[in-house]
Amino acid sequence: FGLGLIAIREDEGKAEASGVNTSLYKILAFAISVWFAGTAGALHAQYLNYVDPDLAFELIITLNLIIMSLFGGRGIVWGPVLGAFVIYPLSAYLVFLLPSRLAGQLHLVALGVVLVLVVMFMPDGVIRTYQAWRRKGPNDYRPVEPQASMAEAAG
């Protein structure tokens, strides 16, 4: 099942040509993800003893989840987990550190800055950026040698 989903993610046309029933796999993946979301919603409603759409669907919750996923790295199981362990304490610390009348606005600005920095400098997330850095090595960067100009090459 997992290999079929990976094949669909990489190239749906090739996966279908190789015999993977892409419609069935996508429906099953959707059903599994909906089951987890529904279970989480039911547990959340049971915990609060009521359902409040304003509380459940706040924009900040969605933005936090997106930032956590992008920070850790999409496509890696531990990426969003790492993102949650870094971003959630950071946001809680910012709310605690900032004055109460500014905490809401500056907290959102700080999360926006983190989002922009991650997208600009680490588009694959922290984990993949770290893995690429480890593969290359920190001291493996050599200065680029100057190229000969067209006039020198022509002689």
Image (cartoon, helix red, strand yellow):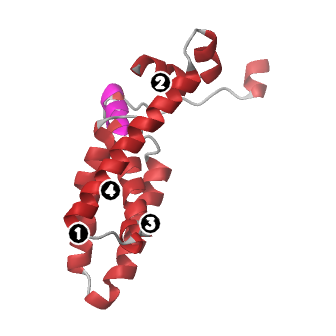
Pair 3/1: label in front: 1
Q: Are marks 4 and 3 in contact (CB under 8 Å)?
A: no
Residue 36 quadrant: top left
Q: Name the residue under label 2.
A: 5
Q: The residue under label 1 is which amino acid type?
A: Asn
Q: Mark 4 points at which residue?
A: 41
Q: How far apart are marks 2 and 4 (CA)?
A: 25 Å
Please, is residue 22 above or below residue 104 in the view? Answer: above
Front residue of 125/6: it is 6
Q: The residue under label 2 is which amino acid type?
A: Leu
Q: Mark 1 points at which residue?
A: 49
Look at the numbered disc 1 and give the secondary structure of its residue. loop
Q: Which residue lies furthest to the top in this view?
A: 18
Look at the numbered disc 2 and give the secondary structure of its residue. helix
Q: Distance between the residues labelled 3 and 1?
A: 32 Å
Q: Distance between the residues labelled 3 and 2?
A: 32 Å
Pair 2/4: label in front: 4
Pair 4/3: label in front: 4
Pair 3/2: label in front: 2
Q: The residue under label 4 is which amino acid type?
A: Gly
Look at the numbered disc 4 and give the secondary structure of its residue. helix
Mark 4 Cα shell of 10 Å, populated few (<14), some (14-19), many (≥20): some
| Residues rendered magenta in the picture | 128-135
Instruction: Look at the image and tell me whether residue 65 can be seen.
Output: yes
Pair 2/1: label in front: 1
Residue shown at the point (28%, 67%) measured from the top left: 91
| Quadrant into which the C terminus falls | top right
Pair 1/4: label in front: 1
